[in-house]
Image (spheres, rainbow, N blue to C red):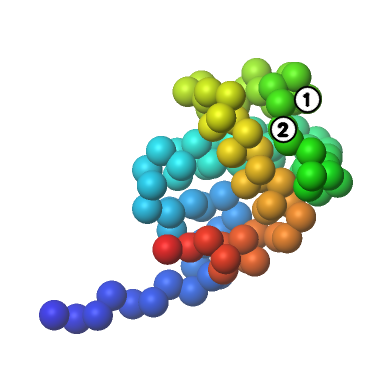
Amino acid sequence: MANKPVQRIDDFAPGDFSFLRNEKNKEMYTYDFKVIESIPGAWEYFKNYPSDLPFVLNDFSEIMSKCWPNHTIGTFGKSMNVLRSIAQMGWEDYVFLVRD
């Protein structure tokens, strides 16, 4: 049986969460990533959002109205934290740290 080739970090274009095993997270992050991409200034906002502050629904009314339709309060916060991490550290570092 042949070994599965190792995937490199640069095999994943920004927004390609196919390296995640959890299908729900993969769908949620992909959907929300596209929303953030479509809103001018959103990445900069996330980059500067303080790491010690939690995300709440009221903070992002424009983003929330367009995000993944299956969000709960918990999944919204989780997804926004992931997007903040991507904005602050960059896509390549995020993939390096979290890929399975």
Q: Residue furthest front?
A: 52
Residue 59, numbered circle: 1
Question: Looking at numbered disc 2 in the image, what kind of residue is underneath it?
Answer: Phe
Q: Is residue 3 above or below residue 21?
A: below
Question: Looking at numbered disc 1 in the image, what kind of residue is underneath it?
Answer: Asp
Q: Mark 2 and mark 1 in contact (Cβ < 8 Å)?
A: yes
Mark 2 lies on a secondary structure that is loop
Of 52 and 28, the residue lying toward us: 52
x 73%, y 60%: residue? 89
35 relative to 7 in the view: left or right: right
Residue 10, numbered circle: none
Residue 55, numbered circle: 2
Q: Residue furthest left?
A: 1
- The x, y position of residue 48, in whole percent, is 86, 46
- The x, y position of residue 80, in whole percent, is 65, 38
Mark 1 lies on a secondary structure that is helix
Of 55 and 87, the residue lying toward us: 55
Q: Residues within 10 Å of mark 2 (few under 14, many from 20)?
A: many
Q: Is residue 48 above or below residue 90?
A: above
22 relative to 87 in the view: left or right: left
Kindly tell me whether residue 34 is visible in this rendering: no
Q: Residue furthest bottom?
A: 2
Kindly tell me whether residue 37 is visible in this rendering: yes
x 28%, y 75%: residue? 4
x 56%, y 68%: residue? 96
62 relative to 22 in the view: left or right: right
Position of the N terminus, as image quadrant, is bottom left
Position of the C terminus, as image quadrant, is bottom left
Q: Quadrant of residue 44?
A: top right
Q: How many marks?
A: 2
- The x, y position of residue 45, in whole percent, is 83, 40
Q: CA distance from mark 1 to mark 2?
A: 7 Å
